[in-house]
Amino acid sequence: MSTATLPGGRLSGAQGPWARFRAGPVGGLARAISSNRKATAGFVILIVFCFLAAFPGLVAHDNPQAEIYTPTLAPSGAHLLGTTAYGQDLFAQLIYSTRESLLIALAAGLLATLLSVIVGVTAAYLGGLIDNVLSLVTDIFLVIPAFPLIVVIAAYSKNGGDPILIAVLVVTGWSYGARQLRVQALSIRDRDFLVAARLRGERRWRVIVSEMLPTMTSLIVAIFLGTTLYAIVAAAGLQFVGLGNPDTLSWGTMLYWAQNNEALQAGSPLWAIMPGVCIAMLGAAFALLNYAFDEVSNPALRPVRKRRR
Amino acid sequence: MRYVLRRLGFFVATLWACLTINFALPRLMPGNPAVAMMVRFKGRVNGQALKALEIAFGVNNGESAIRQYFAYLGNTFTGHFGVSLTFFPDQVSHVVSSALPWTIGLVGITTVLAFIAGTLVGMLAAWRRGGLLDSVFPPLFVIVSAFPYFFLALMGLLLFSVTLHWLPLGFGYSNTDTVSFSWHYIGDVLDHALLPATVILVTSVGGWVLTMRNNMISTLSEDYVRMARAKGLSPARIMFAYAGRNAVLPNLTGFAMSLGFVVSGAILVEYVFSYPGVGYILLSAVENEDYALMQTLFLFITVAVLLAILAMDFVTMALDPRARTQA
């Protein structure tokens, strides 16, 4: 299909920047996303949120923090979602909150994935006593209920701000991925191409980084998606109970202020509903991408097509 | 036998890790926040209780850290957790033991129900690939599982309590009630538990359905299932005793991980409904900087999860002959 003959008689499939792009990892990812409806839906939601995070001013024209309007207005043309009990424009708050919510989730997701790669692959590759110790630590972190631990740490470091929040999410979110990566790394540790690299006399970290990790890309991406989903939900929960920094703008802190003012009972339910909807949509985007990724990497799980007669 | 010993060993190791985290956290934090709490405590508490708190948080550092550590371990195992600031002058152990039944009732029952229902639905979905269950539920649950528990709780509260007035707004039972074993009281408790339980059930069942379906799809293509079909066994027998029994094994191990997740969600659900369980008390302890109560609750939640995991290990042993003979 893509190997159409160009006027010059060359096959476009073999060369050309577009063909090279399609064959590379980015192109592979793009094809995976566009070929799976669930992945496409998740990806589109994510792109919309990324746009809102980058350019909130293009969508919402009010100052999100200014307490200048009549409190608890119903939705109208001037205030699409009405106003809060403090007289802030709810729509502007919602849009401007995207950035912080997304940044916390992505930062925590990335760092936790990095930690799980380091621990999981090191354990599998080095083996022996180091593997035993690292596996035990991983398993312990896996079964300790994360949220109570997060609450305890966050309570001790009150008002530590976003870096503390991210650190806490990383500490509690890396273990699941580390365990999966260890299993996969163990299964490829003695493949021929790794043995060859070792026999060539490559350094240990070079074998791991440039020979072993590329073969595990799809699992690492899946772990990143899962960890980020976890970070979204956990961060929102922490901010909701007031353990984030309540002065910043994010969906979780919006929910915190809504709950503090009993928005549901006091007749401005949108104040609590809309941030929750955004959290759920962002979470759903990552969940859909993750699910689709499962289907791409494991053909047995793909939905069966109805047979035509 | 080695399997049992290994699992018990893991239980002990994890318990020890939790105790150590509990001991180390307040000491690692900059400016030891517990000291500030102790200052507020002085003069309101008798000497013995103060001493226990001092050991727990490392205030008045006359002793070495190692001595403090063993004193702390000793206090924990003999049930001396100190005094609660939030529910002063109640003992922490008393506060915890009055909150535990609420959470164990709520989370325990919903978790078991969600596990059974999710496993059955997942099994059927995989058994009838492309059928109604298989095409509707998995994508639906993917989206629902991304919902924060507390958000669904807020929505349920808005719909059924604030708008429709069908169910109470929160708390475990009506204020006018006296705690007794009358039908009226039990009905009232169930009335209050219905909404939180439904929220936990709806959000946690999806994970079981998805993993069970995926496991079942791979066991269904195994040779022993084909063999069972060739022998002419009844479909129900193949589904439950051949494919299902093997597909549920990874799910039982997964139970360990998900349980922590469900407990985490339940804490926020309790918070939304002011349900008088461990999670709600934990968050009020945090609010009041009642560190002794907070840490003890963390410990109890973890021990409860660890015990449930241990129980699951024994169920796995009963279902999987490989776990009994090997390992």
Image (spheres, coloured by chain):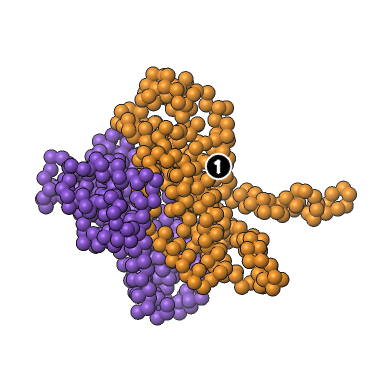
> Could you say which is closer to the camera, residue A118 or residue B275?
A118
- The residue labelled by disc 1 is A46
> Could you say which is closer to the camera, residue B276 or residue B125?
B276
Which chain does the residue under circle 1 lie in?
A
Q: Residue furthest right?
A: A8
Looking at the rendered structure, the kind of residue marked 1 is: Leu
User: Which quadrant holds the C terminus of chain A?
Assistant: bottom right
The correct choice, above or below, for A219 with respect to B275 in the image is: below
| Residue B4 location, quadrant | bottom left
Q: Residue at x 21, y 57 (%)?
A: B80
Say which element carries label 1: helix
| Residue B111 location, quadrant | bottom left
The correct choice, above or below, for A134 with respect to B1 in the image is: above
Q: Residue furthest front?
A: B62
Q: Residue at x 53, y 23 (%)?
A: A61
Quick check: can you spot residue B186? yes
The correct choice, above or below, for A45 with respect to B137 in the image is: above
Quick check: can you spot residue B167? no
Q: Which chain is purple?
A: B
> Could you say which is closer to the camera, residue B33 or residue A145?
B33
Q: Residues within 10 Å of mark 1 (few under 14, many from 20)?
A: many
Residue A28 is left or right of residue B26, and the answer is right
> Could you say which is closer to the camera, residue A42 or residue A120?
A120
In the rendered image of the structure, the colour used to display chain A is orange
Residue A70 at x, y percent in the picture: 39, 18
Q: Residue at x 50, y 31 (%)?
A: A96
Q: Residue at x 37, y 78 (%)?
A: B2
Residue A261 is left or right of residue A192, and the answer is left
Residue A251 is left or right of residue A22, and the answer is left
Residue B225 at x, y percent in the picture: 47, 74
Residue A19 at x, y percent in the picture: 76, 51
